[in-house]
Image (cartoon, grey):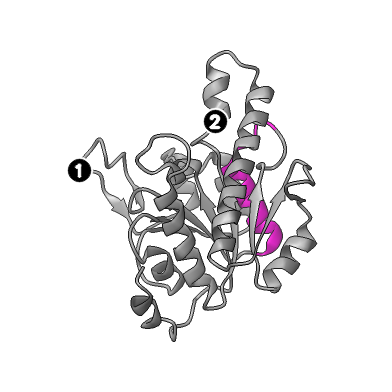
Amino acid sequence: MPEERWREVTNNKSVYKRVLLKLSGEVLQGKKGYGIEVEVISSIVQQIKNIHSIGVQVAISIGGGNIFRGVSAFGSQMDRSSADHMGMLATVINAIALQDALEKASVFCRVQSAIEMQRIAEPYIRRRAIRHLEKGRVVVFAAGTGNPFFSTDTAAALRAAEIGAEVILKATKVDGVFSKDPVKYPDAVKYDHISYMDVLNQRLKIMDSTAISLCMENNLPIMVFNLLKEDNLYKVILGEKIGTIVS
């Protein structure tokens, strides 16, 4: 986003004080189909920096599907626990890449891992994570929950509840939640708002059922939006009606 465009909105107030941004590994790969695309991560970092600069406390939960997907490997006869642990390690790679890009953009950042690896990341400690946020640092949560059989969606819902985030910002490549896959079905209907139960009953693939249930139990709304469209992240932060709200 051009700096001039951002200066126009810096006097506007965020409707959220503390948010958790859920990034899938697939978002980082861009058009490459694997790995990390530098231009994409740079764009994401600029958007994060923009909302951080107006006082929003930002935590990030990151996936690893651009490097390794545990569920896919499990389907190819690998032991599920082994596959999931490999997927967790992939999220750490993405978290370190994101931390490096944020710090090069002059945004202080800490990576906290659910699997202890103290040479490269802090262990996840709830109170420490909250303290980092209060001090104006971005916190990136890596390695999911640290347990196999739980997705990074569930980890995002868990961490958001633990740190007292007001909303989960579910970043995707589409404009919100649709009645069916909008890529395959041109007649798919976009929802502006949908309830947790409707998501579960219609089996809409926003987040897995465990994550949705956890959000429902803790009254934690989920905003689903297209991160790849310029300005969308700060529009969400300013309360503009884009994407789909699940509540």
Is 187 left, or right, of 143 in this rendering? Answer: left
For numbered disc 2, what is the local secondary structure?
loop
Query: Quadrant of the rendered structure where residue 10 is?
Result: bottom left
Q: What stretch is highlighted in magenta?
A: 148-164
Is 192 left, or right, of 36 in this rendering? Answer: left
Location of residue 234 with respect to 62 vertically, above or below: below
Question: Hey, what amino acid is under mark 1?
Answer: Asp
At 42% across and 41% down in the image, what residue appears?
204
- From the top left corner, tell me how far across and down residue 41 is, in percent: 46, 52
Q: Residue 227 magenta-drawn?
A: no
What mark, if any, has residue 68 been given in the picture? 2
Location of residue 118 with respect to 53 vertically, above or below: above
What mark, if any, has residue 187 been given in the picture? 1
Location of residue 145 with respect to 234 vertically, above or below: above
**Between 140 and 191, the one nearer to me in the picture:** 140
Question: Hey, what amino acid is under mark 2?
Answer: Phe
- From the top left corner, tell me how far across and down residue 143 is, in percent: 67, 41
The answer, for residue 15, to whether it is visible in the render is yes
- From the top left corner, tell me how far across and down residue 112 is, in percent: 71, 52
| Prevalent SS, magenta region | helix
**Between 237 and 142, the one nearer to me in the picture:** 142
Query: Quadrant of the rendered structure where residue 166 is?
Result: bottom right
Are the residues at dot 2 and dot 1 in contact (C-beta closer than 8 Å)?
no
For numbered disc 1, what is the local secondary structure?
loop
At 37% across and 71% down in the image, what residue appears?
240
